[in-house]
Image (cartoon, helix red, strand yellow):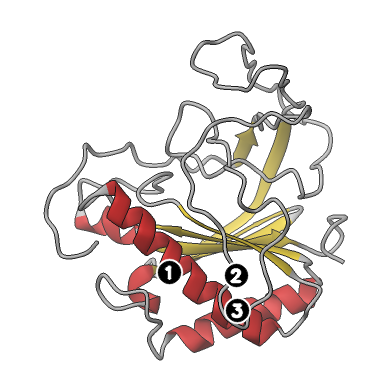
Amino acid sequence: MGGTTARRPAAPAARRPAALVLAAALLLTGGQLHAATAATAAGPGLRPPAAGADDPVPPPGEDPALPPVEDPALPPVGEAATPLPQIDADNPGLRMREGATLAEPRVLDIVSIVESEGGEERREQTTVSLKFALQAEVLFGRDSHELNPRANSRIAAIAEEIRRNGAKQVRVFGFTDDLGSYRHGRTLSRKRADAVHAMLDGQVEDHTVSYIVRGYSEDFPIADNSTEEGREKNRRVEVSFPTKGSGDGS
């Protein structure tokens, strides 16, 4: 990230369970958990992201290796098939606004995870959603937010999946590794997410689709930042949306 060499302490590599349990601490009474996020703004010629997209996205608890918590706009997953972890609402480490309460936890069963041989692209499909993770090197030059010629076909394939599933809300999240400053990573990851959003919006060509666009810097790593291979995986842009039959994708 950016040609600098300073690195923050390595975050633990993400675990890959067969069933990913998300105890979504979503707030039902207007309060929100605290997280550092970049402000959302629509670029020239683009439709603005969904209402509320400027609000901070709460972190998924104490484990930084987990992905961002499910957005309340996405459909419920249903009844838990396995015991859910208990969350202590009085835990001093759980930061909530006064009067806020925790939503019921949900279980998200992983249907399939497919990763290209070189790890440049990862496709994760559940019973209700589809997520693509593209390594930054596939889309951008070093420390750049300008899309390269190879990006068009990759993003076009994702746009086709959005149209096929009739998704009406799409999330575009940018991430970096832990090299350089957190602030620079946050700016770069947001600009990269904006660039993917702009191309994706132009290829989907559906004014009824709304977007949530954010940059997370080095937060939520999916691999070990102590190795170059891990840092390559963490420098990525993720695009996710509900699938057909989920209640929000058709």
SS label for mark 2: loop
Q: Residue at x 63, y 35 (%)?
A: 22
Q: Nearer the viewer, mark 3 or mark 2?
A: 2
For the N terminus, which image quadrant?
Answer: bottom left
Front position among marks 1 and 2: 2
Q: Pointer 1: what residue? A: 192
Name the residue carrying label 2: 42
Point out the tag, 1 or 3, that comes first from the N-terminus: 1
Amino acid at circle 2: Ala
Mark 1 vs 3: CB contact within 8 A:
no
> Tag 2 or tag 1, which sits nearer the N-term?
2
Earlier residue among tags 3 and 2? 2
Q: CA distance from mark 1 to mark 2?
A: 14 Å
Residue 200 numbered tag = 3
Residue at 76% across, 78% down: 163
User: In this rendering, would 38 be left or right of 197?
Assistant: left
Answer yes or no: do the residues labelled 3 and 2 have beta carbons within 8 Å? no
Tell me residue 250's x, y (percent).
Answer: 87, 66
- Confirm whether residue 121 shows in the render: no
- The image quadrant that residue 128 belongs to is bottom right
Hey, what amino acid is under mark 1?
Arg
Badge 3: residue crowd in 10 Å (few <14, some 14–19, many ≥20): many
| Helix, strand or loop under label 1 | helix
- CA–CA distance in space, label 3 to label 2: 13 Å
